[in-house]
Image: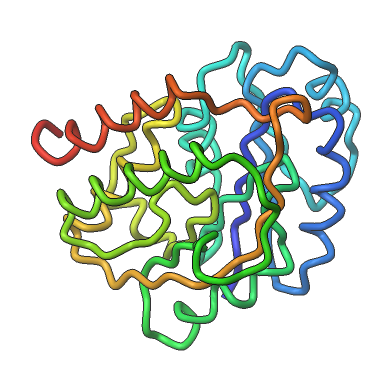
Amino acid sequence: MKLSVVIPVYNEISTIQEILNRVRSAPQDKEIIVVDDGSTDGTREWLEKLTAEDVKVLFHSENKGKGAALRTGFEQATGDIVIIQDADLEYDPRDYDCLIGPILDGRADVVFGSRFLGGPHRVLFFWHYVGNKVLTILSNMFTNLNLTDMETGYKVFRASLLKEIMIRSSRFGFEPEITAKFAKLKCRIYEVPISYSGRVYEEGKKITWRDGLAALFHVIRFKFFD
């Protein structure tokens, strides 16, 4: 099966070349779709000069958010399986085989890569961990799933599901939204352990407590109002 690797990018000049190198090195048959979401740190200019034929680059004229960038990328995806790949080196493309395995062997429609199932991970912030757990528990309460990591950046799914889902969130509400919609469709969802090399804010991490509060709102919103 062909993979569509969709990479939303915002101000990642220090990592964009390396993440593209790592994705290219993954052995699967794939297309690479990069969506620059209004970068202002030189990322856009670097991508504008990129001449690689194996990378499709799309641009937003202004910053609209991760969900909006993913919508743009999904519209261009032609593969059988879609992989969301963050551009900040926190998630390792060497995990692709593990992520797509349950789909390839027919067990799953959707796979979440969990940072909390035993894979190697950088030790970072306690309160981020607590926040992730709280949001995952609340999401599970509303979706009746038993996920360990709803907020994971590695979500992999059959491309055909995009025909049945309309993504409304433009920012970090994307994670609880798509989880809720997979649950409503009664998709077969698997989790697999992944490695995780988290960043600190000095290294460019962008998500904050405000995004956590917004995610809480979206957990409730997409249960009852969408």
- Quarter of the view holding residue 184: bottom left
- Quarter of the view holding residue 182: bottom left
Classify 97 as above or below 50. below
Q: Residue at x 9, y 36 (%)?
A: 224
Q: Is residue 146 left or right of residue 68?
A: left
Q: Is residue 42 left or right of residue 147?
A: right
Q: Residue at x 45, y 77 (%)?
A: 103
From the top left corner, tell me how far across and down residue 164 is, in percent. 26, 52
Q: Is residue 184 left or right of residue 74?
A: left
Classify 141 as above or below 72. below
From the top left corner, tell me how far across and down residue 206 is, in percent. 61, 26
From the top left corner, tell me how far across and down residue 134 is, in percent. 32, 44
Residue that sits furthest to the front in the current view = 126
Q: Residue at x 67, y 32 (%)?
A: 9
From the top left corner, tell me how far across and down residue 56 is, in percent. 72, 42
Classify 95 as above or below 24. below
Total numbered labels: 0
